Amino acid sequence: MGVNTLPLIATALLILVPTALLLIIYFKKIQNG
């Protein structure tokens, strides 16, 4: 079980991190007008 969770965590991070960065940039653009 512990071995199988590492690829899942790595995949989740690869998906969530770029998405979070895009959302941060998107909201900053909205605040700047």
Image (cartoon, helix red, strand yellow):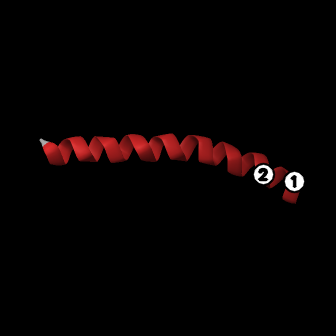
Q: Amino acid at mark 1?
A: Val
Q: Quadrant of residue 26?
A: top left
Q: Amino acid at mark 2?
A: Leu
Left or right: 18 as drawn, with respect to 31? right
Residue drawn at (63%, 47%), measured in percent from left and top?
12
Q: Picture coordinates of residue 11 (x, y %)? A: 67, 43
Q: Quadrant of residue 22?
A: top left
Q: Picture coordinates of residue 1 (x, y %)? A: 87, 58
For mark 1, give the secondary structure.
helix
In this figure, which residue is indicated by the disc labeled 2? 6
Left or right: 26 as drawn, with respect to 12? left
Residue drawn at (61%, 47%), measured in percent from left and top?
13
In this figure, which residue is indicated by the disc labeled 1? 3
Dot 1, how many residues are within 10 Å of its Cα: few (below 14), some (14-19), or many (20+)?
few
| Callouts 1 and 2 close, C-beta under 8 Å | yes
Question: How far is disc 1 from disc 2 in space, using C-alphas?
Answer: 6 Å
Q: Is residue 24 visible?
A: yes
Residue nearest the observer in this picture, 2 or 31 = 31
